[in-house]
Image: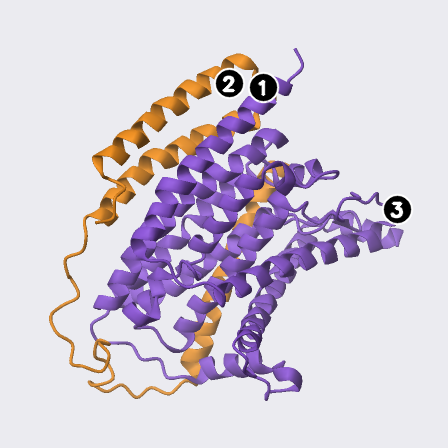
Chain colours: A orange, B purple
Amino acid sequence: MGPYATSYVLIGALMLFGAMVGVAPLVISAWLRPRKPSPLKNQTFECGLESKGDSWVQFKVQYYIYALVFVIFDLETIFLLPWAATFHQLGLFAFLEMIVFLVVLVGGLVWAWRKGVLEWK
Amino acid sequence: MNDLIHLIAITPWAIALVKIGVVLVIMLGLVAYTVLAERRIAALIQDRRGPNRVGPFGLLQPVADGVKFLFKENVMPAHVNKIYYVLAPTITLIPALLTFAVIPFGSTLGGVPMVIADLNVGVLWIFSIASLGVYGIVLAGWSSNSKYPFLGGIRSSAQMISYELSMGMSVIGVFMLVGSLNMTRVVGYQHDCWLVFKQPVGFLIFLVAAFAETNRLPFDLPESEQELVGGYHTEYGSMKFALFFLAEYANMITASALMVTLFFGGWQFPFIGFAPNHPMWNGVLHIGIFFAKLLCLMLVFIWVRWMFPRFRYDQLMNLGWKVFFPLGLANILLTALILTMQAPR
């Protein structure tokens, strides 16, 4: 097995161990802890008052819009990383190319900004 | 000595597994004692004593807390979505531990490189895994089927993705200078000058984004007590709550480790670079230096928490989108410009 595959196997092993760290305490405490459920205890927490209505409250659409804008610009970061890593070898042309790419995206940001997408109202 | 090295060479898998085990144990130990340190420092700052009764200087407090968490009754509210409710703490915890895989926490110890997996796409691994952390929190908020956790979860998702962007932007300058995405190369590049001096703006953005990503004050809106009770973990108790707690501190540790690696020269001695002459002791020293730097940054995390008031949500979003994101872009352009002008023709 080459070093490339080996490192991913090791990461798999770490994932397994990490999952154990997450699950083992739950299992151990399941053996040890008392279990005395009561209807009052099992209520939704609402600062001691009786819970009212269900949890599917309306929430601001703004959270969702941030997520949409995020997707666009997160992709940009992914494109920038390989460019950054090979920046030394690429020379002036790649630099100008990337400037064009960035300017287009900055244009997108400016548009979103003026549209009020980034405004928390 | 040579026998030992020989033995290590024939059992690389065993060594690798031991390394993983040791890293996990050290992480958990660090988490336990960071919690104690946080409580003691908070007490110091607020002019009170803090936990000092369990063992000398309260040093056994984490053990007592752990035992208490184990024996606590596990209240499972009747209205929760059971599978996701139980899974969420573990899902939050695993990414926090996984990020550490590509961080070199020492040079070599008896010929074994002190990094679990030296991926050539190290930073991509870190960002892809770190962004998984938000799933646990959103799942916790959603599956609790209660108003406060729901609002905490949704706040957290918007906050974490916004700052993830700035975080991604901030490190691009670093990789333009280094010319590789591999973390060991990043450390090697800094043998004469730490990157924090070459990328100060990048570091500033990264530091602030790290606070937002770990949901720490001044950006702890997902769990802001005064308005959301406990935020996304309001409905959690006993060991499940402990796992969220563990994940938060593990995230702090990995964020600190990342900053050490990217901006503070990793395991290298400050300013000297350190030429290896004795393989064993130098290796130990390098690990010591790495963890010393890591602890310094952890202290910054703790100190900031007890020094700064919380941001308002609109301020938080404005800072992320309208200040740090354009600043990150400007930093990339500036770095590119300087590098192009410096390049030999």
Q: Tell me the distance, in whole angstroms, between the alpha carbons under discs 3 and 2.
A: 42 Å
Q: Amino acid at mark 2?
A: Phe
Name the residue carrying label 1.
Answer: B340
Is residue A1 visible in the rendered structure shown here? no
Residue B264 image position (x, y, % from top left): 65, 47
The tally of labels here is 3
Residue nearest the viewer, comparing B197 with A67:
B197
Q: Chain of mark 3?
A: B
Q: Are marks 1 and 2 in contact (CB under 8 Å)?
A: yes
As displayed, is residue B88 above or below residue A67?
A: below
The quadrant the N terminus of chain A occupies is top right
As displayed, is residue B238 above or below residue B137?
A: below
Q: Tell me the distance, in whole angstroms, between the alpha carbons under discs 1 and 2.
A: 8 Å
Name the residue carrying label 3.
Answer: B277
Q: Residues within 10 Å of mark 1 (few under 14, many from 20)?
A: some
Q: In which quadrant of the rendered view does residue B303 lie?
A: bottom right
